[in-house]
Image: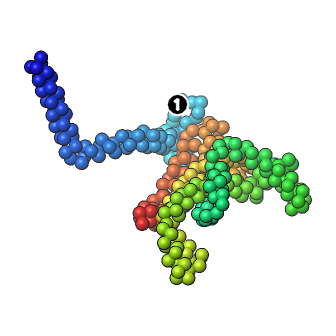
């Protein structure tokens, strides 16, 4: 028995030594360690992000209908037609207004809300929960409710404003071309500005109180404290959220489609809405791919200029 047990233990020891030897050789250099740790993430990103982009760009070079499996190669024909289309430039302008308007308003609302929530007062936890509430409501619910609230005839906003004498008759917030885009920006900012609040609030709570105590002892007022202490500390976070919100707002589709459907007319038809309309209503997949390609190129160029000019990574590391 003793001989058999010794043989078994000897086999186990030899197996463990061989395993350790193999692992030591594998991780002897940094190359294998990088491949085994970063490799799966790179492969996942390639499959989920790069391949669809390449496929969409390839699609944009074809005349491809949704109901026709045969694609015809036309090179840059779709892009040449696109750049001569007034509807494309109107959609580009609407995307520009919606993107910058939403990011600007969200930045102001989110920053002010975060500064208010850093103050200590009774019920601050309940207040924070209520402020976060819009972010928890599904976008489709928010869109449908606001469509009813902004209705010209029976919307609660018009009823209250008429009853208190602010207006004489109902206003078509979503039916008037001059009001549809501002209404959409306000609605969108109400729901999504809390993202900026959360990011800035987390950074504000990491600032030591001793900074503000020292500033108070030196006679600094609220504005000077914000300029010399708060803003330098949150500048990196602000740069980061501006980039993220900018990309997300330019790609925003759901709330625009639910609330206005791109109307009235094409007033709120941004590029994502235009892509959907061309692909799934006009069934022109090639042209939809070309619009997607220009949107991708615009956002990519904006990201390069942004990272080269503002260097947000360095700001965050401070």
The image shows residue 207 at horizontal and vertical percentages of 49, 66
* Residue at 15% across, 34% down: 17
User: Closer to the camera, 230 or 71?
Assistant: 230
The image shows residue 93 at horizontal and vertical percentages of 64, 57
Looking at the image, is 23 positioned above or below residue 239?
above
Is 196 positioned to the left or the right of 54 in the image? Answer: right
Counting every numbered tag in the picture gives 1
User: Closer to the camera, 97 or 219?
Assistant: 219
Element at label 1: loop
Q: Is the image coloured rainbow, by chain, by secondary structure, or in one colour?
A: rainbow
| Rendered-image quadrant of the C terminus | bottom left
* Residue at 41% across, 40% down: 44
User: Closer to the camera, 237 or 41?
Assistant: 237
Q: In the current view of this chain or complex, which residue is farthest to the top?
A: 1
Is 198 positioned to the left or the right of 261 in the image? Answer: left
The image shows residue 51 at horizontal and vertical percentages of 44, 40
* Residue at 66% across, 50% down: 134
The local crowd at label 1, few if under 14, some if 14 to 19, many if 20 or more residues have their Cα within 10 Å, is few
User: Closer to the camera, 111 or 73?
Assistant: 111
| Rendered-image quadrant of the N terminus | top left
In this figure, which residue is indicated by the disc labeled 1? 70
Q: In the current view of this chain or complex, which residue is farthest to the bottom?
A: 219
Looking at the image, is 150 positioned above or below residue 2?
below
**Any part of residue 160 in sight:** yes
The image shows residue 123 at horizontal and vertical percentages of 66, 57
């Amino acid at each position: 028995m003793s001989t058999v047990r010794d043989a078994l233990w000897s086999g186990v020891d030899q197996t463990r030594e061989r395993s350790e030897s193999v692992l030591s050789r594998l991780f002897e250099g940094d190359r294998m360690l990088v491949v085994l740790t970063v490799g799966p993430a790179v492969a996942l990103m390639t499959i989920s992000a790069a391949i669809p982009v390449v496929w969409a760009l390839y699609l944009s070079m074809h005349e491809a209908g949704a109901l026709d499996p045969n694609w015809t190669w036309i090179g840059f024909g779709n892009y040449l037609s696109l750049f001569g289309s007034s509807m494309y430039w109107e959609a580009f302008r609407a995307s520009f207004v919606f993107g910058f308007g939403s990011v600007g308003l969200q930045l102001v609302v989110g920053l002010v809300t975060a500064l208010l929530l850093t103050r200590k007062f009774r019920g601050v936890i309940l207040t924070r929960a209520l402020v976060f509430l819009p972010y928890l409501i599904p976008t489709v619910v928010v869109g449908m409710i606001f469509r009813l609230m902004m209705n010209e005839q029976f919307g609660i906003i018009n009823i209250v404003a008429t009853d208190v004498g602010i207006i004489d008759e109902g206003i078509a917030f979503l039916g008037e071309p001059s009001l549809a885009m501002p209404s959409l920006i306000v609605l969108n900012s109400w729901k999504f500005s809390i993202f900026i609040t959360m990011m800035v609030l987390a950074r504000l709570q990491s600032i030591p109180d001793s900074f503000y105590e020292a500033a108070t002892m030196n006679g600094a007022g609220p504005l000077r404290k914000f300029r010399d202490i708060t803003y330098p500390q949150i500048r990196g976070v602000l740069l980061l959220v501006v980039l993220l919100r900018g990309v997300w707002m330019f790609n925003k589709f759901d709330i625009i489609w639910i609330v206005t459907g791109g109307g009235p007319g094409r007033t709120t038809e941004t590029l994502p809405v235009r892509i959907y309309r061309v692909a799934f209503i006009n069934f022109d997949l090639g042209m939809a791919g070309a619009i997607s390609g220009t949107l991708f190129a615009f956002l990519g160029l904006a990201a390069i200029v942004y990272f080269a000019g503002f260097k947000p990574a360095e700001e965050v590391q401070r």
